[in-house]
Image (cartoon, helix red, strand yellow):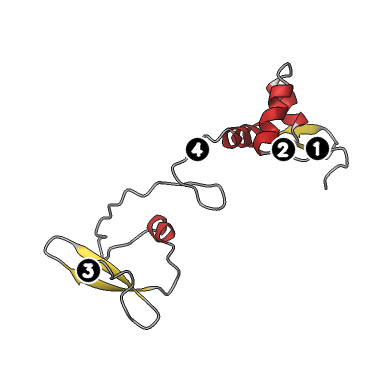
Amino acid sequence: MANATQVEQLTGQELVQKVKDLEDLSKADKAKACGYYTLTKAGNPRVNMMKFLNALIEAEGINLDSTQDGNGRSGRSASFRITVQSNGNLLIGSAYTKKMGLQPGDEFEITLGRKHIRLKQLGENGAVLGDEDE
């Protein structure tokens, strides 16, 4: 439950400007003044420094992660290489399917080449999607 005296968390240029205005304060005091704290059960403020610093980095337009999914967790990055599993299967991980915007149930046509395997996404009627350039 939020306390009525708690400040709304600032973001973007508003956050940057407030931090500049408070240049004489400590990092923790700046974070608190910008709303990056929670109140403990005893009513004491607890500063969320990581959230504050991440918001400040984002407000400055600095992107430290190459990609990020919607919940803020990045995990491993896609290497665009896969290995045949011991049972003979090829597993395409979620990093690739998310990057392509694939949904459960999407279908593909598999074409085997001399040194490659090509997947072509099929539309609802079974037609190959994105075949204009071939």
Question: What residue do we see at 79% from left, 32% from top?
Answer: 45
Return the residue nearer the eye: 118 or 83.
118
Q: Secondary structure at mark 3?
A: loop
Question: Which amino acid, by three-letter code, is at mark 2?
Answer: Leu
Pinpoint residue 28: horizontal percent, then vertical percent. Answer: 71, 25
Separation (CA) of disc 4 from disc 2: 19 Å
Read off the residue under disc 3: 134
Question: What residue do we see at 18% from left, 61% from top?
Answer: 116
Separation (CA) of disc 4 from disc 3: 36 Å
Q: Earlier in the sequence, mark 4 or mark 2?
A: 2
Question: Which amino acid, by three-letter code, is at mark 1?
Answer: Val
Question: Which amino acid, by three-letter code, is at mark 3?
Answer: Glu
Cβ–Cβ under 8 Å for marks 2 and 1: yes
Task: Say which of marks 2 and 1 sits in front.
Answer: 2
Q: Is residue 128 above or below residue 3?
A: below
Cβ–Cβ under 8 Å for marks 3 and 2: no
Question: What residue do we see at 38% from left, 57% from top?
Answer: 96
Question: Which amino acid, by three-letter code, is at mark 4?
Answer: Asn
